[in-house]
Image: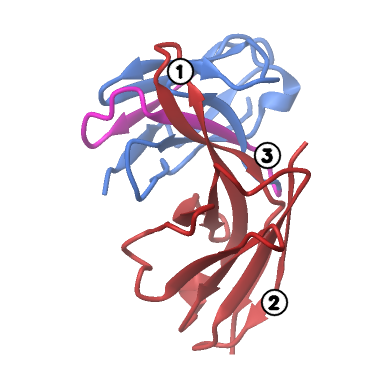
Chain colours: A blue, B red
Amino acid sequence: DIQMTQSPSSLSASVGDRITITCRASQSISTYVNWYQQELGKAPKLLIYAASSLQSGVPSRFSGSGSGTDFTLTISSLQPEDFATYYCQQSYNTPRTFGQGTKLDVK
Amino acid sequence: QVQLQQWGAGLLKPSETLSLTCGVHGGSLSNFYWNWIRQPPGKGLEWLGEIYHSGSTFYNPSLQSRLTISIDTSKNQFSLKLTSMTAADTAVYYCARGSYGPGKDHYSYYFTDVWGKGTAVTVSS
């Protein structure tokens, strides 16, 4: 199985901050990475697929980059509704493994 | 707008079998992959498996011996059965749709874009 390792596991920030979350794959997976946002008590929501393609309806302050083994999710200017947990997922093969999550909370 | 509505028993005893069903509303099963994903309390997401509309299945090897995913195109729904449940299987179980879309390089990429609301399942004697 491909292991996906996210860092940091938690992050404190303020409204307006720029933040970056990193995901590292245990083997090269090209750009087969998705990013999801999960608010407390809700189902995950797709933000980014193919490492850098923005899902329809997702604000442009979200962006993704990377290829091979190292990937990043960036939020350019945090909004109050962005405080949530974020997960990466590899779609290179099955099982479609997730990172362990990054919890973003208010500083 | 496709919506997924899921249902099934939420409280099980050890050794019992979990049965969940996910109905697809406002869209077809065709040409999509239909997933089950779970999340133990306070933990991360675990992909369990998926089924294509044709019936082809892909399972997480860690659960393959206990897991069956099936599809009923006549009812526009798909189902999960997980046998020999233990406390370690306590989780919120999500159904979700897997799709392919073009990336910036115009290749097709897989993603999970529609999710059910989740069913909380507790295993306790």
Residue located 39% across and 45% down the image = A96
* Marks 2 and 1 in Cβ contact (< 8 Å): no
Q: Is residue A94 left or right of residue B44?
A: left
Q: Which residue is mark 1?
A: B103
- Write the start and end of the magenta stretch as one range: A20-41
Foreground mark, 3 or 1? 1
Measuring from the top left, give residue B10's x and y in whole percent. 69, 74
Q: Residues within 10 Å of mark 3 (few under 14, many from 20)?
A: some
In the picture of the structure, the residue carrying the numbered disc 3 is A39
Whether residue A49 sits left or right of residue A68 in the image: it is: right
- Going by the numbered disc 3, the residue's amino acid type is Glu
Pointers 3 and 1 in contact (C-beta within 8 Å): no
Name the mark on residue B26.
none
Observer-nearest of B36 and A12: B36
Same chain assignment for discs 3 and 2: no
SS assignment at label 2: loop
The quarter of the picture where residue A25 lies is top left
- At label 1, the amino acid type is Gly
Q: At numbered mark 3, what does the secondary structure look like: helix, strand or loop?
A: loop
What label does residue B9 carry, if any?
2
